[in-house]
Image (cartoon, rainbow, N blue to C red):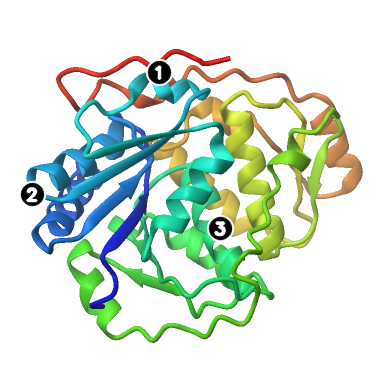
Amino acid sequence: MNNINKFTVYLGSSGRCRPVFKETAKILGHLIGECGKSLIYGGMDAGLMGIVANNALSSGAHVTGIIPKKLKDSERIHPSLSETILVPDLWERKLKMFNRADAIIGLAGGFGTIDEVLEALYWANLGAHAKPIILVNTDNYWDEFIAYLGTLPDLSREHLIVVDNVADIFDALQNWTPPAITGDTNNMPHFENEILGDTDAPIIFEDASIRDGYFLATALGLKQLDKHQRPIGLLNDRGQFDHLIRWIDQAQKECFITERCTQLFSVGQSLADLQKKMDMQKDIHIDLQNEKWGPSETKTHIEIHEIE
């Protein structure tokens, strides 16, 4: 625990979630600052992101925000961080957030949050790092997602720590033994280029695996941000995606995923059924500012316009 000083926190930008999730972000921010640790996060002032940053800052933490220049959420950059890093794209943001971390914490969030968590787990599975990945299961929010992880036959859970409360994080880390790094620490594969390639071909997932789970979460996250409109389908012929689908329903009810975000993909019990549903998928354009983020968590915010 003595060598864990920098915490990268993945969490939702939703300002419309229940108070229990906001309180968790508040407590985590205070805890990081009071323990003399540093916070690294996605740089926004909206939702849980703004809450964790504000409370870490008020408790004396060094807070680094990493945010892409060309994403819509760059218009909601937090104005008072210790350090703000602008990067070219979403992939560079995720990589820099990961590389700066000694440990990863996942609070409640939506497609972007599970993309980041699954990415860290996938790289761990490749033996590329020995960083702990902590899920804070506030009010059982992650139950179905954790159950989904349990169905992935190729997932090693050596890096994963699950706690019910933020206060349990440091005790859990004290009792955690880092696994050996067995792979190439420079091998951090990602799927953005494959997803955003010059094609409209549908993306179909048939098997539950850590690789495909990460691929799926990235595809959904990018589609939510209007980076592509490729049809996405889950062939759920063996119930292999049941837990993940139930988690998505839970995330939508808790306002971490908008109702229209649940229309970004289709589910079918057979390939013919799935293909028919995917043929009917319409382009979805999510207004994150009005549908998800809610009001700023800071009194003022900086607007950074898209840079060509």
Does 68 sit left or right of 198 as displayed? left
Which label lies toward us, 2 or 1?
2
**Which residue is pictured at 18% across the width and 57% down the height?**
32
Q: Which mark is residue 289?
A: 1
* Type of the residue with mark 3: Leu
Crowdedness near tag 2: few (<14), some (14–19) or many (≥20) residues, C-alpha within 10 Å: some
The nearer-to-camera label among 3 and 2 is 2
- Residue 219 x/y as whole percent: 67, 40
Q: Nearer the viewer, residue 174 or 68?
A: 68
Q: Earlier along the polypeptide chain: callout 2 or callout 1?
A: 2
What residue would you read off at disc 3?
118
Q: Residue placed at 70% from the left, 27% from the top?
A: 228
Where residue 188 sits in the image (x, y, percent)? Answer: 63, 59
Q: Earlier in the sequence, mark 3 or mark 2?
A: 2
If the image is split into quadrants, where does the C terminus sit? Answer: top right
| Earlier-in-chain disc, 3 versus 1 | 3
Quarter occupied by residue 240? bottom right
Residue 106 screen position, x and y as percent: 38, 56
How far apart marks 3 and 1 lie (CA) works out to 25 Å
- Amino acid tagged 2: Ser
Left or right: where 199 falls relative to 210: right
Question: Residue 59 got which mark?
Answer: 2
